[in-house]
Image (tube, rainbow, N blue to C red):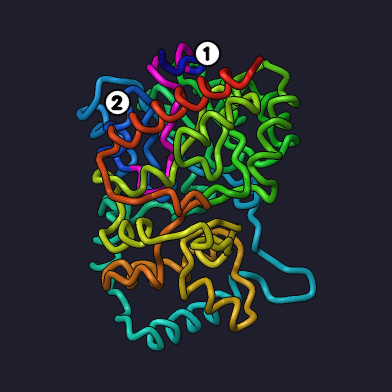
Amino acid sequence: MGLHTRVCDMLGIDVPILLAGMGRASTPELAAAVSNAGGLGVIGAASCGANQLRAWIRRTRELTDKPFGVDTLLPASVRRGAGKSNVGGPSAAELLPQHKAFAADFLKHEALAEPDGETMARVLDRDPADADGPAPLSREFFEAQMEVVIEERVPVYAAGLGSPAPWMDRLHANGTKVIAVVGATRHALQVLESGIDIIVAQGHDGGGHNSPIGTMALIPQVVDAVAGRVPVLGAGGIGDGRGVAAAMMLGAEGAWIGTAFLATEEAGISGPMKRALVEGTDQGTVVSRSITGKPARMVRNSWAHAYVEAGIEPLPMPYQSMVSARVTAAAVTAGRADVWGGFAGQGLGMIHAVRPASAVLQDIVAGAVRELARAQALLR
């Protein structure tokens, strides 16, 4: 007995478990490991320049002959040029020097060295060929990524934030299945009208950019809203088979899982960050705009706390990433997970060891099958 839903048939996978496309953590190695184990591995390419994205796609194809996906961000606020001006106040661009000075003072307080260009490139693993490309997380950057996704004819594309509607015809013409991650029923209905293939309902419990609505409340409402027209995957705080079973009882046809796969041998994060996940508890995360400029759940850290303590509002995307990148690079270089421990969901306390991704997937599936069978036994 195993897990099988229409998601498996649509994507050509054995079990309806998808690796969340966690930026730079969901590497080709991790994505391939999940795909090879029967799920769908998804490359986390949010911050990859066009050349690096192409290289990652081709590397994944070298590591697996199974279907896989690519996840990027498509935030509408950036495409519309948000942050250019504030009514009655300075623009985000005008505030940028002040925030960079704040970051420099923070690094001194934490006794961290200001990273040079070489360190930044090494930590961020950026392809030198992208050095002259569009600024990361800008509208032009996202559009260049999408051209690569289309040219490389990837099996699955996932919009981790925003709507892929402008590219839908070209993606479908390539045979690419398209997924959108949403945090509200209105967003689900918007992407549904664009012809999306699968919707991920990601609640507030999830790591990274998420919803203000709790996972348990969000999943059934999205399921009801789409009324069976496309499958819905549950996401947000789902870290083991019990969470998958719960999502399926709420009407989901599988799960989009991130944090559980961070503590794996293949995940593209540092050893100290993996140890922080193993040591984490259910109170080990916080939601902050201090990294990308949009609310995101992350491991508790002193950088996010510094903004709260100073009473300063982070800048909108993409400006805040211009501030935070040097801080996160310095923290990773020094092995300081207390300064920046990465994005993670509230299922943190369910992680107890760093293991191979295949073992994590197998345990999740076995646990879900066990819990669904137990639920059936409760009926009289």
**Dot 1: what SS?**
helix
Instruction: Please name the amino acid that badge 2 sits on.
Output: Ala
Q: Is residue 328 left or right of residue 91?
A: left
Q: Tell me the magenta residue range.
A: 8-26
Q: Residue at x 31, y 54 (%)?
A: 269
**Up/down of 243 relative to 373, above or below:** below
The answer to whether residue 56 shows anywhere in this view is no
**Is 14 inside the magenta-drawn segment?**
yes
Give 179 or 130, whichever is nearer the viewer.
179
Q: Which residue is mark 1?
A: 6
**Dot 2: what SS?**
loop
**Is 109 inside the magenta-drawn segment?**
no
Quadrant for the N terminus, please. Answer: top left
Residue 273 position in % (x across, y down):
33, 60
Judged from this view, the residue extending furthest toward the right is: 88
The answer to whether residue 102 shows anywhere in this view is yes
Quarter of the image for residue 20 reads: top left
Quarter of the image for residue 286 reads: bottom right
Q: Is residue 372 left or right of residue 379?
A: left
Give 26 or 167, whichever is nearer the viewer.
26
Residue 37: mark: 2
Q: Residue at x 29, y 63 (%)?
A: 272
